[in-house]
Image: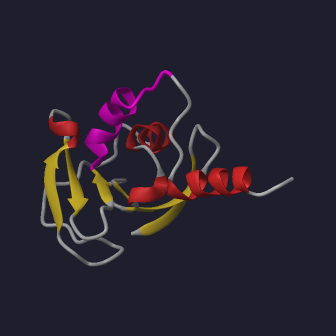
């Protein structure tokens, strides 16, 4: 695994864990909307990128076993950590999530962004 800084379309910079061999990505629950992250990751996927096998994955954050399921019940299979809610996106699912996650409004912010917005509204100028 390697750490990768990634700038998403809502100008947030997040840090994800990226598999050096297959370019699959692990990211935290509060990093933002998966489609937004997938769109930022799409640029790094090449024709010769290997596709990871579905295997027993271990969460890089808390070491729990990742559980496989369909994203939003009908999307591609992704891994989800039942302990910390981290998400694993296999390389072959990145394009699907990039398309499926398109929103008509601004991208949702992560937990930290929503906290900062609420705090800035609560504090006097």
- Relative placement, left or right, of 102 versus 86 is right
Give the image location of residue 98, x and y in percent.
39, 33
Instruction: Give the residue furthest to the right.
Output: 125
Q: Residue at x 87, y 53 (%)?
A: 125
The structure residue drawn at horizontal position 30% and vertical position 62%, both measured from the top left corner, is 85
Query: x, y (%) of residue 76?
Result: 20, 38
How many marks overall?
0
Residue at the spot 59% in from the left edge and 57% down from the top edge: 115
Question: Where residue 32 sits in the image (x, y, percent)?
Answer: 47, 49
Residue closest to the eye, 84 or 21: 84
With 2 as the anchor, is 63 left or right in this view? left
- Residue 28 lies, with reference to residue 103, above or below; the image says below
Using the rendered view, name the quadrant where residue 67 is placed: bottom left
Image quadrant in which you'd find residue 27: bottom left
Magenta stretch encompasses residue 108:
no
User: Magenta segment range?
Assistant: 90-104
Q: Is residue 96 above or below residue 113?
A: above
State the residue in front, 16 or 51. 16
Image quadrant in which the N terminus is located: bottom left
- Does residue 13 appear in the picture of this structure? no
Give residue 15's position: percent from left, percent from top: 52, 61
Residue drawn at 37 percent across, 27 percent down: 99
* Residue 95 inside the magenta-drawn segment: yes
């Amino acid at each position: 695994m390697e750490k990768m800084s990634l700038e998403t379309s809502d100008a947030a910079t997040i840090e994800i864990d990226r598999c050096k061999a297959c370019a699959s990505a692990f990211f935290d629950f509060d990093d933002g909307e998966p489609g937004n992250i997938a769109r930022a990751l799409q640029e790094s996927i090449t024709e010769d990128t290997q596709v990871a096998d579905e295997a027993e994955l271990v969460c890089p954050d808390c070491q729990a076993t990742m559980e496989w399921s369909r994203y939003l019940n009908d999307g591609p299979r992704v891994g989800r950590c039942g302990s910390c809610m981290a998400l694993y996106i296999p390389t072959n699912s990145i394009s699907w999530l990039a398309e499926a996650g398109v929103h008509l409004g601004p991208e949702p912010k992560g937990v930290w962004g929503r906290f900062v917005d609420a705090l800035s509204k609560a504090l006097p100028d």
